[in-house]
Image (spheres, rainbow, N blue to C red):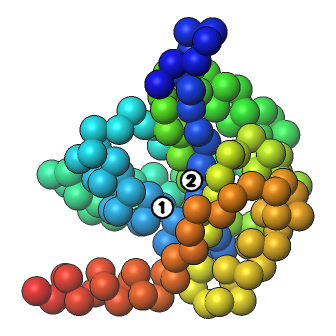
Amino acid sequence: MWNIHNKISSKVIGVFGFPGSGKTTFVWEVLYPKLQKAGHNFFIQRANPDADRPLSSKGKLAGVQKLGGVFNEEFVNWVIKSVENLRKQFNLVYLDCGGMQSEENKKIIEICDEAIVIGKEVKDLISWRDFILNTKNIPIKFYLSSIVFNEVNLSEDKV
């Protein structure tokens, strides 16, 4: 979709949750194949300096490798600049965000139009909801319990 300035009209959606909640697994195992199959014009941007890097094998997530990095102003500015450029090229930009409720993540939330929240427990989902909405009043697209998600993955592995 194009706007009146001949730029792609885009939406930035942050994926938030505490460390180990399944954000990267969700982004690459569920979201990526669904968006690709549907033919969406999208990009998934790492917005966490020590994020898990997906390792693929024949189009499937084969594991993750921890990337080293510091969540500081320089990194946040790099993410913001990257998103500015990605908005010009893609209708949907998903951010695989950091797992701590920090000042750095507040700056990431500020550039988001919507959020997805992933947590192991209801209290995690509520905590992230409150953190996001206290930073910027954006729609939370949906909440995902990673306990259910992990159980589904485990049962699929057994089949």
Residue 65 seen in this snapshot = no
Q: Residues within 10 Å of mark 1 (few under 14, many from 20)?
A: many
Q: Secondary structure at mark 2?
A: strand
Q: Quadrant of residue 110?
A: top right
Q: Is residue 159 left or right of residue 142?
A: left
- Quadrant containing the C terminus is bottom left
For this orientation, the residue located farthest to the front is: 4
Q: Secondary structure at mark 1?
A: helix
Q: Do the residues under discs 1 and 2 have CB atoms within 8 angstroms?
A: yes
State the residue in front, 125 or 120.
125
Residue type, numbered disc 1: Thr
Residue type, numbered disc 2: Asp
Q: Is residue 33 left or right of residue 58?
A: right
Q: Which mark is residue 97?
A: none
Residue 99 seen in this snapshot = yes
State the residue in front, 104 or 15.
15
| Residue at image coords 29%, 60% | 61
Q: Quadrant of residue 80?
A: top right
| Residue at image coords 75%, 47% | 108
| Residue at image coords 28%, 53% | 33
Residue 32, placed above or below residue 118:
above
Q: Position of residue 28 (x, y in %)?
A: 38, 56
N-terminal of the pair, mark 1 or mark 2, is: 1
Give the Cα distance between marks 1 and 2: 6 Å
Q: Is residue 60 left or right of residue 47?
A: left
The residue that label 2 is drawn on is 96
Q: Position of residue 104 (x, y in %)?
A: 82, 51
The residue that label 1 is drawn on is 24
Q: Quadrant of residue 142?
A: bottom right
Counting the numbered discs, the total is 2
Residue 134, placed above or below residue 14:
below
State the residue in front, 49 or 31.
31
